[in-house]
Amino acid sequence: MKRALQPMSMPLSRRGRDVEAPEALFGIRHVLRNGWLIVGVACAITILAIAVALGVKPVYESNILIQITRHAPPSADLQTETPAITEIEILRSRSVLARVVNALHLDIAVEPTLFPVVGAFIARSNPGLSDPGLFGLGGYVWGNEQARVDIFKVPDALLGQPFRLVVSGHDAYTLSQPEAGIRLHGKVGQQLRASTLSGPLDILVTSIHARPGAAFTLHRSREGQAVDRLQRSLAIAEKGRLSNVIGVSLQGGNPELVSRILNEIADQYIQQQTAQKTDEVKNQLVFYDQQVAQAQRRIGELDVRLNELLRKHGASDLSEDARILAQQSLVLQAELTAKEQQKIALSSRFGDRHPDMLVVTRHIASVRRDLADIETRRKGFAAAQQEILAVNRDKLAHSQMSFELLNMRHKLDALMLSNHINVRLVDRAQTPLQSVTLALPVMVVLACLLGVVSGLVASVLKNSLVRRKHRGGAAWGVRRLAIGTQAPLADDNDEQQSAASPVSPTAGQGEAAPGAGQGDAAPAAAQRSMEGNTARGEAPATTTQG
């Protein structure tokens, strides 16, 4: 009688398989078993990371501090925002940054042609001039080569396109753009004008600090693009709450240019504030000059009117003349009284036609005429005095207004001469000496660590793939073994059922059930044994019992 195939090793439990699976992947013995893979991946990643670190350009940062002074408002409730908020937006405005771009020619980019990957590192390490090119070819520079271009105007179609400037000799250069078919020869310090297919081209190379054969790359961008780049790169913020001190910082690869840009921003901002204050003072001076001129003109008109009144009444001082007339009127009144008394005395002795009566009567009539004339003159003087009083009052008012206007104008003149503004540059930008990026030794150490970690990860991935492949092969072997053991088990069950059927059908049926259960359990046990062996890294082992 044939018996079922049984595995030699005991099946592992599911818990044992779960514990051994991470050990097979992350165990130190299994991970370090792939030594050559770890070393290869670590070296490759480390070399690649070091190459990238050598090509990284260091970034420098500098800053300036600006103080804003404002007069306090009458009430604290009226102050809804700090003055620094407005000044921050003015510092970031195009009106300030456009002047900076034009002053420093930030829309013109001149960069030496460096060898890929390691060229930048070698150039930073060499403070002097180098022999251009790689084996005399390519125009690559390996030192501190520099070129300054103050004017570079190109047609709109060539904006943003790279131009190649090659030093061809002493104070001579060649400018080329192969795509546009441009090739020009120029001298340092002389402006070069040429006509191209796209339009006119102007260039002025101020200085070149390089040996013949050195190549530079030129780019000309739009002014608006240069201003936008500068706006995005500036970091402007108030130092502390309500401090009215503004800090402006900038990062860049050229430390000298970073400090120059910040100082130029401060100068342009203060210059704009000074010009704005000067314009305001000038406008106020013009207004006060107009008001003073109007007051002086009105005073002149009143003087003319006063002189006309004095000439009309034939006196230079009407008040004095009125006083004299009053005294004359009193004298004539006394004389008139005396003559009338004399006439009364004479009338008692003489008749009206007596010579003495006639003389007194004529004298009384003359005195009355003089009194009437004086009264008429006094009435004219009273009207004239009222008009002259009004003229003098207006003249006094305009004189006081003119004095106040002149006083304000003198204050504005003093303010304009003092150049008083509300901003003050506290700290100017200094040329930074240390970069804000990681130093090269630190980046090399990080590259080595990255290489080691990458090698370990590669080893773990390899173990995972190998384990998955073994588990797939073991599962296929178990299925083949289960298929092969099902046929002998079926034959044994049939023989047992035929031998037991004459005695007791019920018993035969009862015995067949355990046989069938054993036949079904054998493949499952074999499969569990195979999986357990595979989890331990062992090959599945089986034997046949007869």
Image: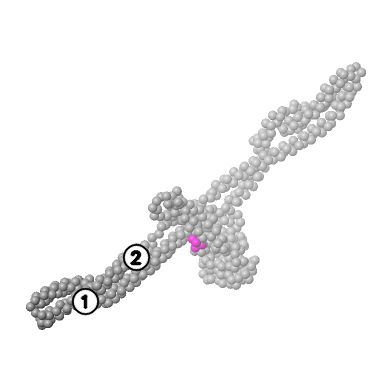
Q: Main SS of the magenta segment?
A: helix
Q: Amino acid at mark 1?
A: Asp
Report whether 137 appears left or right of 258: right
Q: Look at the image and give the residue range highlighted in magenta.
A: 95-99
Report whether 423 appears left or right of 367: right
Foreground residue among 419 and 299:
299
Circle 2 residue: 405
Q: Name the colouring of the figure.
A: one colour
Quarter the C terminus occupies? top right
Can residue 408 be seen in the rendering of this structure? yes
Q: Is residue 98 rendered magenta in the image? A: yes
Give the secondary structure at mark 2: helix
Q: Earlier in the sequence, mark 1 or mark 2?
A: 1
| Direction right: furthest residue | 502
Q: Amino acid at mark 2?
A: Leu
* Residue at (29, 67) in percent of width and height: 393
Give the vertical position of 118 relative to 201 (above or below): above
The disc at residue 373 is: 1
Foreground residue among 248 and 383:
383
